Image (cartoon, grey):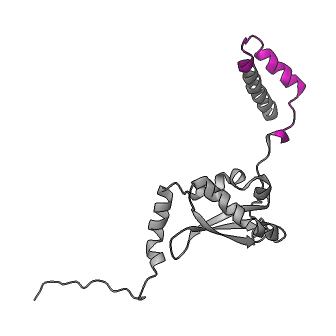
Amino acid sequence: MTGTTTKPERRKRGFERTSKLLGARIRKAGESRGFAVSRIITHWDEIAGEATAQICRPIEVSYGRGGFGATLTVLTTGANAPMLEMQKEQLREKVNAVYGYAAISRIRLTQTAPSGFSEGQAQFQPRKNAGDTPAPDPEVKRRAEETARDIQDDKLRAALEALATNIYTRNASKS
């Protein structure tokens, strides 16, 4: 007999965990239901609230062995961990409210410095409020008003003044 018969390849490690085999499919199903990890990261201030967002940040979403519900890992410093520990349930409810279903079943806290263990990592800085920007130079403000003075509509004039102020401020800082 010269025909080649192939035996099905046998796994060398024995049994595989179901969670390992289904992990990618569960993640894909979660994303199709609107659960995207990037939304948690990009909208963390709105989801967690300003005070909570200043003391922690999300770093990982992982799926458990059962595949039902995910675990959100949140990074915080050791000093803020007890305070955050008491707020875990409310935080979980806020995250799940964004998705409309129980996407996160558990929150796990990781305590470390905001820069991590290795040197040279970027510090975590919450985004600045709009009120933190300094007032424009009076000369720039006058030029912006002069640019938009012929506009009759008040709202349009205000918008054009703001645009002109931004442009004049940017051009002044470049030169």
146 part of magenta stretch = yes
Give the x, y percent position of residue 44: 69, 54
Report the span colored magenta. Answer: 131-157
In the picture, measured across the screen, residue 111 lies left or right of residue 4, that is: right
The residue lying at 43 percent from left, 75 percent from top is: 21
Give the answer, above or below, for where 135 lies relative to 31. above
Nearer to me, 122 or 110: 110
In which quadrant is the C terminus drawn?
top right
Give the answer, above or below, for where 62 lies relative to 165. below
144 part of magenta stretch = yes
Give the x, y percent position of residue 4: 17, 83
- Name the quadrant containing residue 36: bottom right
Nearer to me, 145 or 170: 145
Give the answer, above or below, for where 84 lies relative to 161. below
The residue lying at 80 percent from left, 21 percent from top is: 144
In the picture, measured across the screen, residue 57 lies left or right of residue 20, that is: right
The residue lying at 55 percent from left, 74 percent from top is: 64
In the picture, measured across the screen, residue 116 lies left or right of residue 138, that is: left
The residue lying at 72 percent from left, 72 percent from top is: 110
- Name the quadrant containing residue 40: bottom right
Give the x, y percent position of residue 61: 60, 66
In which quadrant is the N terminus drawn?
bottom left
